[in-house]
Image (cartoon, rainbow, N blue to C red):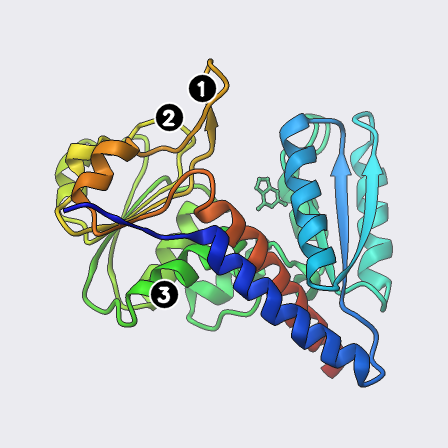
Amino acid sequence: MTAQILDGKALSERIVDELRQQVDALVASGKRAPALAVILVGDDPASAIYVRNKKRACERADVRSVSHDLPASTSQAELLALIDKLNDDPEVDGILVQMPLPPQIEPETVIERIHPDKDVDGFHPYNIGRLAVRMPTLRSCTPMGVMTLLKSVHSDMRGMNALVVGASNHVGRPMGLELLMAGCTVTTANSQTRNLPVLALQADIVVVAVGRPNLVKGEWIKEGATVADVGINRLPDGRICGDVEYAVAAERAAWITPVPGGVGPMTVASLLQNTLQAYEIHQKA
Ligand code: GUN
């Protein structure tokens, strides 16, 4: 079997176009446009690229983005003070603090300081907890984007075996909760997992979010499976690759995400969907 491409770039563009129509209708009716505050601390080059992509997507959706570029020397207290100000600002719907943060700042403290109603990354323990009890509000963007992609080819995932490789707070754990909510039988593998090839060969859906090039071998993929590769790794020769050995996996899978152009753009589309949802929450409050 040769896999069909799960084209995250194309789907994300359709989602952003639809969001723009919704935003334009709001503005035409006299309401203000949704606004996203984007905080970047320091000068990590990869983070700068991610933030630029997010701000460009805001422009395409006619969402207002407000940049806060802070030096790498910013103290935790200074960052928390800015978050407090944005939490209180009625013109700001979403707050995004790009990760990773410099070593003097604890990411958990920062994430918990963002008001859950403005947590458009869906990282706050309150929002993860709501997903865990099947009452999702603002959902973690990467797992949400993967679910949108999976649902585009599987209208009903009930009873499917899903394997999530990676158990991070931001991707692996909420990914498992999303798949569970869709009715899958979910296995989450972590760095201690002993029989990963065996688990992978049983999986109808494989989502990999580890950050190690070609960790999942193509021959571990079950014939006809669907593969979503969250990894974005830069090889020594400068090429970008995912966590899945793409060429061999694509000969076995039915559907597979490319890297780049698969999950990455869907994360950005989900961020904008969350920003519009946060806006609606604030309009009702
Ligand atoms: N760093 C890498 N991915 C993300 C993301 O989705 N959100 C934030 N805030 N930081 C990140």
Question: Few, some or many C-alpha atoms within 10 Å of disc 3 (few <14, some 14-19, many ≥20)?
Answer: few
Q: Is residue 31 above or below residue 89?
A: below
Gap between marks 1 and 3 measured at Cα: 31 Å
What residue does disc 1 label? 235
What residue does disc 2 label? 213
Q: Is residue 66 left or right of residue 110?
A: right
Q: Earlier in the sequence, mark 1 or mark 3?
A: 3
| Residue occupying the point 76% across, 68% down | 34
Q: Is residue 73 left or right of residue 117?
A: right
Percent position of residue 3, x then y: 23, 47
Percent position of residue 250, x then y: 24, 40
> Where on the picture, by quarter, is residue 186?
bottom left
Which residue is more in the foreground, 124 or 5?
5
Gap between marks 1 and 2 measured at Cα: 8 Å
For the residue marked with disc 3, what is the amino acid?
Answer: Ser
For the residue marked with disc 2, what is the amino acid?
Answer: Pro
> Where on the picture, by quarter, is residue 285?
bottom right
Which disc number belongs to residue 152? 3
Secondary structure, mark 1, is loop
- Count of numbered badges drawn on the protein: 3
| Residue occupying the point 40% across, 46% down | 172
Q: Earlier in the sequence, mark 1 or mark 2?
A: 2
Which residue is more in the foreground, 102 or 254?
254
Question: Few, some or many C-alpha atoms within 10 Å of disc 2 (few <14, some 14-19, many ≥20)?
Answer: some
Secondary structure, mark 2, is loop
For the residue marked with disc 1, what is the amino acid?
Answer: Leu
Q: Given the current orientation, which residue lies at the most extreme bottom position? A: 29
Q: Is residue 201 visible?
A: yes
| Disc 2: residue Cβ within 8 A of ligand 1's nearest atom | no
Q: Earlier in the sequence, mark 2 or mark 3?
A: 3
User: Do the CB atoms of the residues marked 1 and 2 lie less than 8 Å apart?
Assistant: yes
